Image (cartoon, helix red, strand yellow):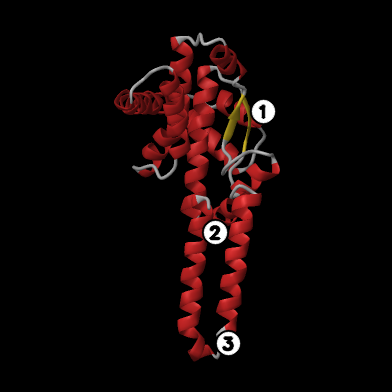
Amino acid sequence: MSKTALNLVAISVFLITFSSLLGPFIHLSPTVPAVATFTILGLATLDSFSLQGKGGTILLDWIAGFSPEHRDRIIHHEAGHFLTAYLLGIPVTGYTLSAWEAWKQGQPGQGGVTFDDRELASQLDVDKISVPMVERYCTLWMAGIAAETLVFDNAEGGSDDKNKLNSLLTVLGFSESNCQQKQRFHALQAKTLLQENWSKYQALVKAMQQRASVADCQNAIASAEF
């Protein structure tokens, strides 16, 4: 069972246990928690094997979305990726701000900013990737963490971004310790890039809050003053 499904089950069991304890005081039939437990476990199993955990991801993301800070973090995190891609010349093809939006667009996980990475893929296919290409994408992947850290003093997201960076560097022969060093280095690179273009970042965040199109987001960046 996927980690997402297990998290969903854990939350559900807690709520069901709580309802069982509270049941006698509100005259709740004991069969209700039992039926609910069976149903949730069945749905979690179905989601894990048939939907690869996407249903649980959407539900958990929907629950987390009730928190204004969670929604704000996602926008600032993804804006970090978007602006860094723009500044480094990596074409942005779209973005999503929730697991539901990602699912509707056929994207895995909780979504985020999508890029035209055909140039990176073509270099990987011929096993001849340039150093500038590696540097650009490593900085891009760490930009969400850098943005969260700048705005909130810490980062809650970014595990997938670290995995992407580590996967690329591992293929290129980097050791685990070197990958950790590269994470820190490129997080600093991204942080500096965002700080140098802070007015553009703020303009982009505002545009993404309004769910502006990619083209309108790029216009907001271009129109912002340094």
Amino acid residing under circle 1: Ala
Q: Report the residue at 53% width, 27% height from top.
A: 224
Give x and y (percent) for residue 13.
49, 69
Task: From this view, report whether residue 171 is shown above or below residue 98.
Answer: above
Amino acid residing under circle 2: Ile
Towards the viewer: 224 or 155: 155
Which residue in the protein does label 3 denote? 29
Amino acid residing under circle 3: Ser
Task: From this view, report whether residue 81 is shown above or below residue 46.
Answer: above
Give x and y (percent) for residue 180.
32, 28
For the residues marked 1 and 3, what is the alpha-carbon distance in whole angstroms? 55 Å
Give x and y (percent) for residue 198.
44, 30
- Pointer 1 with pointer 3, Cβ within 8 A: no
Which residue in the protein does label 1 denote? 215
For the residues marked 2 and 1, what is the alpha-carbon distance in whole angstroms? 30 Å
Towards the viewer: 78 or 158: 158
Towards the viewer: 91 or 217: 91
Task: From this view, report whether residue 66 is shown above or below residue 154.
Answer: below
- Pointer 2 with pointer 1, Cβ within 8 A: no
Quadrant in the picture for residue 62: bottom right
Mark 3 residue crowding within 10 angstroms, few (<14) / some (14–19) / many (20+):
few
Which residue in the protein does label 2 denote? 63
Asked whether residue 198 appears in the rendered view, the answer is no
